[in-house]
Amino acid sequence: MSEILGATGTTSPINPIRKKELDDKWKSIVTKAVTDEAFKKQLVADPVKAIEEQGLKAVDGIKIAFDEVTKVFKVGVDNGSNEEVTAEGKWWGIRLKMIKEFGVELNRQVGTVAGFEEGTKAREII
């Protein structure tokens, strides 16, 4: 299949109808994760199940498995898969890495530092 110009200005060998379906469902999943803490926790705990429950499933030829040693999801593509399936496999790999980041808690430290404008006068930072 010929490559198609995507929203990012780059080309994608994924069928434009399938690409739109992937991207639209992904946007709704991310929106739900940002606005629904319980769903976000479910998504981080079992991303494949949570994504499938939201109506998004990988096409035949793409295998997603959890690696117990590295604690990350691995995406594999069947040997002999066409360019479109391979590109979608990459799409899934990127999204699963993003989901792992959803579970990372930011640990912001608050303290005092010497202010630049006021010389050595301490000021609060966040």
Image: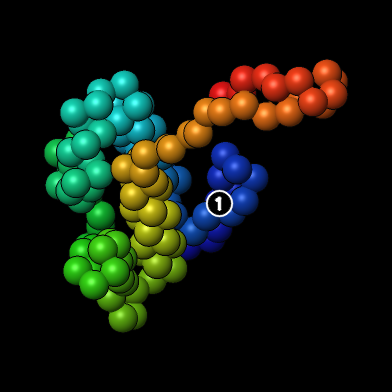
Q: Quadrant of the C terminus?
A: top right
Write down the quadrant of residue 17 in the picture: top left
Q: Nearer the viewer, residue 27 or 68?
A: 68
Residue wearing tag 1: 4
Q: Nearer the viewer, residue 68 or 23?
A: 68
Task: Tell me what residue is drawn at x 38 percent, y 71 percent.
Answer: 82
Q: Position of residue 47 (x, y in %)?
A: 23, 47
- Residue 16 lies left or right of residue 61; in this view the side is right
Q: Can you see residue 61?
A: no
Position above or below: 10 against 122: below
Write down the quadrant of residue 122 in the picture: top right
Q: Can you see residue 10?
A: yes
For the residue labelled by badge 1, is the local secondary structure a helix, a strand or a loop?
A: strand
Q: Position of residue 3 (x, y in %)?
A: 55, 58
Task: Tell me what residue is drawn at x 25 percent, y 57 percent.
Answer: 59
Position above or below: 32 against 6: above
Task: Tell me what residue is drawn at x 33 percent, y 80 percent.
Answer: 80
Q: Position of residue 39 (x, y in %)?
A: 20, 31
Position above or below: 86 against 91: below
Position above or below: 59 against 124: below
Q: Position of residue 67 (x, y in %)?
A: 23, 69
How many residues crowd around disc 1 within 10 Å: few (fewer than 14), some, or many (20 or more)? some
- Residue 36 lies left or right of residue 4; in this view the side is left
- Residue 114 lies left or right of residue 30; in this view the side is right
Q: Amino acid at mark 1?
A: Ile
